[in-house]
Amino acid sequence: MTLAIIRKTGARPYPPRLTEFTATFWNELANGRFMLSRCGDCSHRSFPPKKICPICWSRKIGWVEHDGRGVVYSHALVHAAPAYFQNELPFRVCVIDLVEGPRMATRLIDATADNLFGAAVRLVTLQYDDGALFAARPG
Amino acid sequence: MTKPVRRLQKPVAIMAAAATPCAHLQSAESSAIQTVEHEILGGCVIDAMAASGLDKSQIDSLVFTTPRTYTKQRYFGTFMANYLRISCSGVVMEVLGNGMTGGLAFDQAVLQIASGAADVALCLGISMETGIDRSAHLAYQMRTNGDVDFHAPFGLTPRAWYGLDAARYAHESGATREQLAAIAVKSYANGVLNPLATRRERYTLDQVLSHPPISEGMGLLEFSAPADGAVCLVLTTEDIAKSRGRPYVLVRSRGFHHAGMHEISEVPDDMLAFTAAARAAADAYESAGVTAQDVDVAELYAASTIIEALVSEAVGLVPRGQGAAAAAAGETSIGGRIPVNTSGGLIARGHPAYVTPLYGVVELFDQLRGASGPRQVKDAGIGIMLSELGNFSGASVHVLEGVR
């Protein structure tokens, strides 16, 4: 386990769909492990996980764990959102670059610093009653 | 390997245009008397054809924008062919591609003429969304912009993505809140002069800044105005246009690029470069034999202030990092160095999403014929129309020129 697991009450506001393939990602996330799909031919690591390598189109896909360390590329405070998220407003979203890994977008939680650009973040598991989500937080 | 310059096989002319104002056209579902799509668009077709001086028997092709899902009549293109009793041997089709829908429909109509498949083509459509529940629409948008399973669960709406652009832009360029908001002030100043605009009211910088924040400090007045709208354009060969003896607008070239990404690339890149817009514009300029410096007026698809700043940079109208500052300095105003979105743009003229790019063509059609009244850009000769999809994952550019 490399990701801190934060317990959240209630259900996820907008739960993702699981496929036979992506279930691996979500199940491991619940265990505090952040998995990237990795191409067996060209070694490209993808996020979101993909059954086919987007670079070389290989179907030889495996999984590799990432420790969840990254840096903030951008972040924004959002004040208006669809009904699902009304109780969470305002919330902060971010684009982060995982260290030697893919760029991704998610929530940024517990952010207090004024200038977060380039700041170190770590992914965490948000464990809801009905399943896991992830988020980034400074640290 | 040298990349070939792709050119239109044949010159294409815009002969006429008609549009409803961008407004609340759609009735609520509960309303006893309804406004319906074919009755609204039918009027535009009659007006545009009358202005063209052509007969309906000359129409070879109908290229429609697909109506939004909130429009009840489906298979709308073939339905309209019957409603207006237009028989065609070119094509009758509907085009769909997110916010680029209007741009792609225009492109397909242009290609009908350029390829010789048609001598007369209508590019037309209606987009309605004001009669439906707004929060349902926001939820729908979350399913279009980004990944339903890996972005939507975090509340990444289009406005959230704009906020991410705006924050990074401020960080990199030093652009201030006031400079970005100046783009909205400029948009409203133009919209006041446009009879097709939905928000026809001037706002001061203080008023724009004092509206409730939506995303990363940008307030309500810095985003596109939801609207309904309907447009019909008449496209022909240049020979037919010439034979009418009236001013027309020539489509000089097209450019298109999709970056093979959707909102974001997992391979870290320069998110503010809007590569698709830059490449589509570069190809369109090259194909037309012009440069960004030759452009006199631009209609750019920008659903928020930050997007207008970034796209005006990407297509080379202002230097990198200067989009907001240039607007604040008046460079992109009517009378400025390079007027952008003289129609008021998506912010003031309004944003009937699937036909918005067609309103861009309508504005340039007037500007390049010297028919824009108080909005007229002096001696406007060359204009560009740009549409995009998904935070500029893809972009389409057309270079237009007035022939008077």
Image (cartoon, coloured by chain):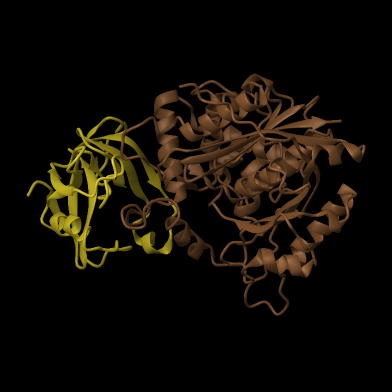
- Residue B352 visible within the image: no
Residue A122 in the image, given as x and y percentages of width and height: 18, 41
**Residue at the limit of the structure toward the right, as seen here:** B245
Q: Which chain did the renderer colour brown?
A: B
Left or right of residue A3: residue B166: right
Q: Which chain did the renderer colour yellow?
A: A
In the image, A101 versus B340, the foreground residue is: A101
Q: Residue at x 45, y 22 (%)?
A: B1
Residue B162 in the image, given as x and y percentages of width and height: 46, 42
Left or right of residue A55: residue B258: right
Q: Quadrant of the C terminus of chain B?
A: top right
Left or right of residue A5: residue B113: right
Residue B64 sits in quarter = bottom right
Left or right of residue B52: residue B259: left
In the image, B18 versus A75, the foreground residue is: B18
**Residue at the limit of the structure toward the left, as seen here:** A1
